[in-house]
Image (cartoon, helix red, strand yellow):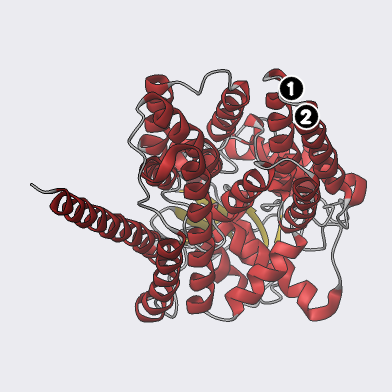
Amino acid sequence: MSSAALRAQSASDAALSHLAFKIVHTAVALGVVSAVIFAPANEATLALDHFDGARILAGHGIATTLGMESLSAAGSPTAAVGWLGAVVTDALASAGATLSTFFAALAALVTFALVERRARRVGGAIFGLAATGLALLCAIGSFGFAGGIVTALFAVTLAEILDRPGTAAAVGATLLAVLWCNVAPQGIFAPAISLVLALGARFEARSEDEQRWRWIAFAGTALALFATPGFLAFPGIALEDLRLDRGLQDIVPFNPIEVAPLAYRLGFPLAFFAAFAVGVRPRRVGDVLLLLAAGLLALANGTYLPVFGVLVAPLLGASAAAEFPLPESKLATPRGDVLVAIAGVLAAAILVATLVPRERPAAPGYGLAAALALDAKPHRLMCMNVDWCDAAFANDSATRAFMDGRVGAYPQSVRDAQVAFVHLHGPWRRTLATYRIDAVLARKNRGLSMLMALTPGWKAVASDDLAVLYERGAR
């Protein structure tokens, strides 16, 4: 075959490779959009943000203490944790399911685009796409509106900024941390991620200039913890709101197998299998620290599995590329990336407008709490899962709760009483009497539910697939 024919054949093969890569790239983007559309919203975050955001938008100011909706701790400081996220979430939710789902799809697309960008930069196009797939598996179950993908977006954006140490990175990381801390308690992860990267640079004996800028970025993100309405109170309350305390067992869901079963069974073990198979790049102590820190975080609370995925997948992609080097290719081009991005956004707009239902049924447990709040009677409610009580605060309800999802704002004595009630320990009946509880929302087929059914004066008035609502003196 002549040299001209060989060149023509090579050009044809390259064109086919480019086309195949764009098709796979676009298919991944469509898969992300579809996952968002069919994922349920995060009812816990949505209910509480609707309550807090509505009050702020109505002009009542940013609340820094628990209000009269709390039976046990009215006036306890909240540090206004997540006030900005509550405003944005409530505004989007009020605009309708279509708009809120579209923004959730955009957040997911940007998240995984950044994952691929970080992985591609050190591992090439093929391993960049593989890293994106791994991060996707770690995020299964977190794609819904107000879900864990928002935390993952902040985490991967911060990592992308810090990948290029310098003045711009230090300033950008600090500003992002300020925004993150006002959006959610998970903003406390910003200085943690910055610290891990700074320690990695130190142990790897990077240049003095790089080490200095990484420590400056850490200092800036640490100071961002105090740039909220809660000021000095924010770090402590936000840390409690991360729900890493094992003492909260059974009153909030956090076990990985409970909150993200598919991600825990698929993405998480696959990531560690890849880590054992390809290791980490030589002399990259920072990669090991980040892998261990993110893995421990995901095990402590399964809702942070997406954060684990977006931070660790690019590292594993780079390790795989170092272990199994591929011939250099230009499968990914700036023009192709732009085309895929445009296709992803257009697909999100079309699919969301076509497939998203105008209203979604309430999640089990939350629907019962919301129905109780709509009967126009004042109730004093105790929920086995404290997040369920958040749904009882909507629409200026007269219902008050012993404890709700703002676990960081409640004193330890209240949390202990809630745990004792759920586990039927100690003077749990006295708690009902002291606070004059007249409604209990319990999980089906648990000891508490069975005991409430047998208690004189209490009657089951409603139930769903997960929970039963009991009322005192109900007919």
Residue 276 as seen in the image, left or right of residue 285: left
Residue 463: percent from the left, percent from the top? 43, 60
- Under tag 1, what secondary structure? helix
Give the vertical position of 363 relative to 356 (above or below).
above
Q: Secondary structure at mark 2?
A: helix
Q: Residue furthest right?
A: 232
Image point (84%, 79%), residue name:
59
Q: How would you rate the neighbour count of disc 2 (Cα within 10 Å): few for under 14, some for 14-19, many for 20 or more? A: many
The residue under label 2 is which amino acid type? Gln
Does residue 455 lie above or below 94 as drawn?
above
The amino acid on which the numbered mark 1 sits, given as a three-letter code, is: Arg
Q: Is residue 451 visible?
A: no
In this view, the residue in front, 331 or 27, is 331
**Alpha-carbon span between mark 1 and mark 2:** 6 Å
On the image, numbered disc 1 is attached to which residue? 202
* Mark closest to the chain's N terminus, 1 or 2: 1
Crowdedness of circle 1 by 10 Å Cα count: few (<14), some, many (20+)? some
**In the displayed image of the protein, which residue is found farthest to the left?**
1
Observer-nearest of 178 and 346: 346
Figure quadrant of residue 289:
top right
Q: Nearer the viewer, residue 409 or 139?
A: 139
> Where residue 309 appears, x then y in whole percent?
49, 40
Check residue 65 in the rendering and tell me which mark sits there, or answer none: none
Residue 211: image tag: 2
Name the spot of residue 460 as percent of width and height, x first.
48, 58
Q: Which residue is depicted at the point 70% across and 65% down?
A: 86
Q: Mark 1 and 2 residues: CB-CB less than 8 Å, in contact?
A: yes
Find residue 165 and report its image quarter: top right
Residue 202 at what x, y percent from top left? Answer: 74, 22
Residue at the (79%, 51%) spot, across then down: 72
Quick check: can you spot residue 362?
Answer: yes
